[in-house]
Amino acid sequence: MKRRDFIKTVGAVTAVTAATATAFSQENKSSGNETGKMTMRKDLHGEDVSLLGYGCMRWPTTIDAEGKTVIDQEQVNALVDYAIEHGINYFDTAPVYGQGESERVTGIALSRHPRSSYKIATKMSNHRGDWSLESALKMYRHSFEALQTDYIDYYLLHSVGGSSGDFNSMEVLQKRFFDNGLLDFLLKEREAGRIRNLGFSFHGDQQVFDHLLSLQDAQAPGERQLWDFVQIQMNYVDWKLAHTRSEREVNAEYLYGELDRRNIPVVIMEPLLGGRLANLPGVAARQLQERRPDKSLASWAFRFCGTQPRVQVVLSGMTYKEHLVDNLSSFCPLEPLSEDDMQLLFKISEDYVKYPLVPCTDCKYCMPCPYGVDIPGVFAHYNKCVNEGFVKEDRQDPAYRKARRAYLVSLDRNLDKLRQANHCIGCRQCVDACPQRIGIPGQMRRIEEHTEQLKRDLSPL
């Protein structure tokens, strides 16, 4: 598809006036302040959307009669019921979540409620190699069947911005959505009402992000926005310091700013940075607990995102009811951060990025490893030990022996020996799949070397 033809196609779509965008901004500054009620934001149609959205990637699991780990439908039903009862109406899933089962399980749970009581977000997850239109349409139609619906409220081009094999990020974008006619198809589906809002989720190359927004900039005044919303990774660390993980990472301040000035509603993923902002190192944790002893560490991260007026939804993957209950307290209603609160979080961020943490968000896109390594599990164990002070390099440190014991004992308790870092052979199959662009084999070697050094130390555990 040529760029000129693409813009022509977009121009044929129904208009949304500038007044609607202005109303969106005004509504989002004032709505949802009733005590005990979920803070709501308005979408471009003027409809209420819960500021807290339910991320359906990590549903609770159980063991079935054959000994297999499966999603626990009964628990999912209970969580969805509780969420809807307490004001959540945005549920975000994808064909690849939950080993391909999330859409089906989520659809069963949601279909027990009136369709008007919830909004479904799902994705075109064709980012894993097969970019044919035939395969994409099969995925698209299966989403409707699995979710038991005849329309999707929020449909996303999933995980744009990454490279793949010999193709750079712009080439991948072109092949996934333009050359095969897929975006033309999705625009027609939006025009027909089977997609109510069309957007994309961004991971990676700023060039791709800027290009997709430039297509919207090329539209004539009065035409419907090409992108009804955009999903980005945002949290108080990534706001100014995402680039410290990699020179290719894009600070959330830039992403949000570009969307805000175009009146594009923003959906937030990774507000807790893969859960790490709910488990801060000691000094940072104490600073926040001293200021708000009645609030969780996670609440600070959620309030940071919700304070931004262009944010429409903040997603959280709430596997257990205690997560759901705690997160609801941050949004029922939202208490925006003060400027002093913001500055404290930015100061904590500057200290936080100095820790040798692996920036894994436990999305599991890297799995399964062909050699059996539990990649997210290895990183989660290492990061937990860093946060708890159990990663010590200096043998003269008075806390070294205690830290060594804690690290090695918890390693074997939490990870099967056959799934630990020393079984990584550096095949790099996982690297392209990682939206955080972690150099996974290098990080595995670093963790393995640290672990082996601890094991070579002959002092008793």
Image: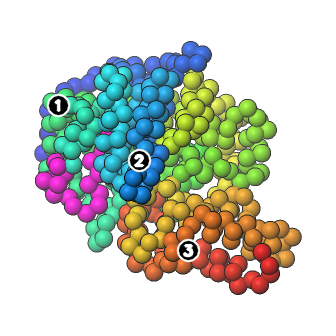
Disc 2 to disc 3, C-alpha distance: 25 Å
Q: Which residue is mark 3?
A: 417
Q: Nearer the viewer, residue 375 or 245?
A: 375
Answer few, some or many: residues within 10 Å of disc 2's Cα (few below 14, many 20 plus, some between 14 and 19).
many
Q: Which residue is mark 1?
A: 191
Q: Residue at x 75, y 83 (%)?
A: 457
Circle 2 SS class: strand
Answer few, some or many: residues within 10 Å of disc 1's Cα (few below 14, many 20 plus, some between 14 and 19).
some
Q: Residue at x 47, y 34 (%)?
A: 79
Q: Which residues are magenta?
A: 122-138
332 to 93, vertically: above or below: above
For the residue marked with disc 1, what is the amino acid? Glu
Occupied quadrant, residue 445: bottom right
Q: Residue furthest right?
A: 398
For the residue marked with disc 2, what is the amino acid? Ile
Q: Nearer the viewer, residue 260 or 47?
A: 47
First along the sequence among labels 1 and 3? 1
Q: Which residue is mark 2?
A: 71
Q: Is residue 450 visible?
A: yes
Dot in front, 1 or 3: 3
Circle 3 SS class: helix
List x then y, in percent, for residue 28.
47, 23
Answer few, some or many: residues within 10 Å of disc 3's Cα (few below 14, many 20 plus, some between 14 and 19).
few
Task: Specify whether residue 104 is painted magenta.
Answer: no
Q: Determine whether, in the image, residue 334 is placed left or right of residue 41.
A: right
Q: Determine whether, in the image, residue 327 is placed left or right of residue 45.
A: right
